[in-house]
Image (tube, rainbow, N blue to C red):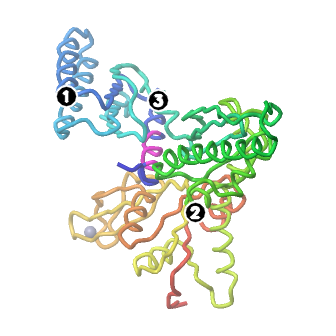
Amino acid sequence: MEITDQRKYEFKVALEKVKELQGKGTELISLYVPPTRQISDVTNYLKGEYSQSSNIKSSSTRKNVQSAISSILARLRAYKRTPENGIVFFIGHRKVGADQTRMIQFVLEPPDPVPTFLYRCDSQFFTEPLDGMLLDKNVYGLIVIDRSEATIGFLRGKHIELIRNIESQVPSKHRMGGQSARRFERLIEIAAHEFFKKIANLSNEAFLSEKDLQGVLIGGPGPTKDYFMKEEYLHHELQKKVLDVFDTGYTDEYGLREMVEKARQTLSNIDLMREKNLIQRLLEEIRRADGGLAAYGEENVKQALAAGAVDSLLVSEDLRKLKVDFKCPKCGFEKELILTTTPDEMKCDKCGEDMEVIKEEDLVTQLFRQAESVNTKLELISGESEEGELLKKAFGGLAAILRFPLNRTS
Ligand SMILES: [Zn+2]
């Protein structure tokens, strides 16, 4: 399954919540199930832990541990097989008030595979294996090349992955032997051409099968890299994705690292550039006399979205709000509110009775779903650029670039 922006976002928010609970509970169970572990194995393991826990002396601790294990067992029944990346449970009890506890449970399917099986019962949730999973996962193709050697690799997030290192059979120009200089020149050129073709083919094979490839970086010590680029040895799809050509001292694995180091600025600019461009487009639209193709303010954006008028929905990554649906049990009056936390009580507007919360959802998750249903791209905007800050501060973290203008009532 593809790891969508939505899944990444939901994982991030869930992990934040799990971490917030650190130190606020006791008997917290963390269970990591890697993709290779069968559900039935895990069930058996937990049954073992359950019987073990009958030795716990404190009756309240025993009760909490056993109810947490039972809850995991119940949830595992919903799985026929282990999910693609495995599954992680955080289940336990948190203290509410003096001597009361409430069960808390999180079930996460992480964006990267769970590395190893782990069961831990502690006063803390164990989240360390998940921390690295939120790093930037953009993928770039890497080639460093000269006439004697080339190395191909990937940059995945912060990690460099070597694909191939190849030495060429191209004779160096000064070893002329007994042949005529012209004939020798020609042989060298043929050998070099064959070498470049081979490197291009290997790169095509590796890079074209990478669905989320963001770009290609080419480097090397001499003019070969520019020649390789100019003569368009790479597949035309990749040729279009070449971001830049870099000088490096080496053409081995170290050369890849050298190039990535030099490309850092280019790469971080590319990520931010996309966000900056979107916000700048929004501002241009807003500045137009007729209001342009823009919407902002929660109500306007939601209306535009419902009308299918939104092209790009711009949402601040750290917008943390909830959409809460209330219903009055007495008169049936319903209302929905966007809030930062769910209030302890809410009186009915019609009859004054205490309303019940019937649904509570993260606003961004809800927007992701709504956007998908009308074929709108939701763009999560980080706060790392000035423009991203502006979206957060001036527009409450939510704005839209429209496909067509909406009739404005005001
Ligand atoms: Zn009512």
* Ligand 1 quarter of the rendering: bottom left
Which mark is first along the chain, 2 or 1?
1
Q: Nearer the viewer, mark 3 or mark 2?
A: 2
Q: Are marks 1 and 2 in contact (CB under 8 Å)?
A: no
Secondary structure of the residue carrying numbered label 3 = loop
Label 2 neighbourhood size at 10 Å, few (<14), some (14-19), many (20+)? many
Q: Are marks 3 and 2 in contact (CB under 8 Å)?
A: no
Of residues 212 and 128, the one nearer the viewer is 212
Q: Which residue is mark 2?
A: 397
Looking at the image, residue 319 sits to the left or right of residue 352; the answer is right
| Amino acid type at mark 1 | Ser
- Find the magenta span and give its range: 8-15
Q: Which residue is mark 3?
A: 22
Q: Is residue 52 above or below residue 326?
A: above
Residue drawn at (75%, 51%), measured in percent from left and top? Answer: 226
Secondary structure of the residue carrying numbered label 2 = loop
User: Is residue 266 in the magenta section?
Assistant: no
User: Is residue 12 in the magenta section?
Assistant: yes
Q: CA distance from mark 3 to mark 1?
A: 22 Å
Q: Is residue 41 above or below residue 165?
A: above
Q: Quadrant of the C terminus?
A: bottom right
Which mark is first along the chain, 1 or 3?
3
